[in-house]
Amino acid sequence: MRKPGFLSIIFAVLLFMLVPDQASAKIIKSHGFSLFGDLMYKSNFKHFNYVNPDAPKGGTYVRAVDNFDNLNPYIPGTGGAQMWGGVYGGYAEMLMVPTADEPNSAYGLIAESVTYPSDYSWAEFKIRKIARWHDGKPITAEDVIFSFNTLKEKGHPTWRQNYMDIEEAKKMGTDRVRFILSRADRALIWNLVQTLAVFNKEYWSTREFENSSLEIPVMSGPYKITKIDVGNSMTQERVKNYWGKDLPVNKGRWNFDVVRSDVYRDWSIRYEAFMAGNFDLMGETTLSRWMTGYKSDAVDKGYIVKKEYAPQGSMMFLGMGINARRDRFKDKRVREALAYAFDWDWINKTIYYNKYGRLESYFQGTELAHKGKPSGAELKLLKPFEKQVDPRVFTEQFSLPKTGAAQDELRKNLRIASELLKEAGWTPKGGKLVNSKGEEFTVEFLLQDPNQESLFAPFIDNLKRLGVNASMQRLDPTAFWPKYWAYDWDICANGLFPHSLSPGAEFRNYWGSAAADMSPSFNTQAIKNPVVDTLIEKVVNAKNRPEKLTACRALDRVLCWEFYSIPLYYWNKSLTAYWDRFGFPEKLPEWTRNPFSGDPDALWIDKKKDEVINKMRASKR
């Protein structure tokens, strides 16, 4: 056998020195995981601070939901006609549970611990021995690996994007799964912690995961579905012997014996049904109804309580999305002209009692939002794109056109809009706006909420003054969502959920070029911009907090100045009315301040209050 030569040995030593020493990375084992900073709850915590650990069990909670034709929220489907988040307690449990009083942190549920090196090149989860499916069989490493592979291959594009940088899931024993990351990044581990739903491999191996279904799967959570009446309701019952009921993350939660989800397609009918006592909670979305409605004996006597909660942190971005799949909307000048034709100030004064503020950032109300002129760090990041972005990005704070609700100011804005359209090749002819081919400029607004008509109607009138053939089409949810996800619309009011304060890969789903070609996709406006793509990767790969903030602010500026959406309004309050039959913990969650946010899992039915409400409701029938 030939012995290695001297040069070979030297080469091997040098190669070893050049390869990062992964063995020297510190190995961390923890009961939870935080995207940044230390965990608030120590390993011996007994329950979350915002729950009553002795909350009584019992009673029925009735809530209102949109229609549904599918139970599985993890696949491409029909949007609102699908029951997104409609299963109380979750369609599938997660490895760890996010907490409502601590941003970007989660604690062990199915996984009792997570182990990872200080360089974040992999993460290993240990499955609890007590974790069980509703049929009594244990949740295994095979279930976790199957779930990861299924979501990565067949799930909604959001999940495929979330896991694109996670190479594989490896079984390290009957109760341990290790995820190998393609790049060392703490955010990739956080993606697993907060999004990896665990499905029953035995059940799903004989079914097509990617197909819509109303069959009740084998689940593992605190509730089981017991009845489905499509178009009307779904009933769930608390699992008395739920395997996780005594875990610290579940103590004091999931207190209702029965949860019934009743379908209301029309919000006006939903409001009337709530006032009649047919369900318990109304999250109001129409400010005018909130201001002028909710008048009855039940309200006057305190049986119905109206509350305005002011949550902390980021808020939803709501805007009129402009579909750049249409050729006429590919030109930024056209999109900006539309923004000039929208008289928000008049609408806010006339319809919304001047209660709303105007969104002028995708990260409104957070330190991620751009402010004033770009900082030196932002300018340095943006400099390579000087010829590719609007020059105002470098010199101005983004600001939307304003009128002060004055007609003279609106006329000025319409003149600016007309000039922008002319520059883009659209000129008046016979009272119509046409291009060089004689094609008429048309805009159709797609909506499902009748209350949006008052928002779109004045906009349509202004566009007609410019020569645009503008109209609106209102559909019920069963017709609206298939059309929406087929991108068969010009302009549609849509929104993005509040962003994490440490965002990352999810931005690829919202604004990345690759997501624009997926169907369905959260990049509904078909944003395909190499500058945006580059800035998203700067956010994803930021090495520290200052870098992430700089990248987010630069990205925010570019998105705003491209006028992909016409930003709408915000009021940093959630409007909630409820029948006063609930018990509340003494301390509310720090980051939501709203006990009804999401699943009101820390509430319970107060028997004394419930008796009073039931008598009152009975007297009305």
Image (cartoon, rainbow, N blue to C red):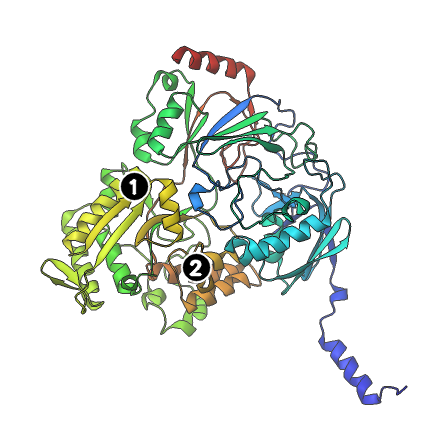
Q: Residue furthest front?
A: 206
Image coordinates for residue 498, horizontal then vertical, percent: 46, 47
* Point 29% across, 33% down: residue: 288
Q: Earlier in the sequence, mark 1 or mark 2?
A: 1
> Residue most toward the right?
1
Other-residue count near label 2 (Cα within 10 Å), few / some / many at <14 / 14–19 / ≥20 = many
> In the rendered view, does 376 fall on the left or right side of 352?
right
Query: 274 above or below 345?
Result: above
Rendered image quadrant of residue 563: bottom left
- Is the residue under label 2 in contact with that under label 1 (CB below 8 Å)? no
Q: Amino acid at mark 1?
A: Gln
Residue toward you, 563 or 94: 94
Q: Which residue does the numbered mark 2 point to in the structure image?
A: 511
Q: Is residue 490 above or below residue 599?
A: below
Q: Quadrant of the N terminus?
A: bottom right
Q: Position of residue 431 (x, y in %)?
A: 10, 57
- In depth, the one of 616 and 221 nearer the eye is 221
User: Looking at the picture, which amino acid does disc 2 mark?
Assistant: Trp
Residue that carries the numbered disc 1 in the rendered image: 452
Residue at 27% in and 36% down: 353
Horizontal placement of 331 versus 125: left or right? left
Q: Is residue 205 visible?
A: yes
Q: How many marks?
A: 2
Mark 1 residue crowding within 10 angstroms, few (<14) / some (14–19) / many (20+): some
Report how far apart the C-alphas of labels 1 and 2 lie in the structure: 25 Å
As drawn, is 369 to the left or to the right of 588?
A: left
Query: Under tag 1, what secondary structure?
Result: helix
At a point 36% along the width and 49% down the height, the residue shown is 483
**Residue 241 in picture, x, y percent from top left:** 70, 29
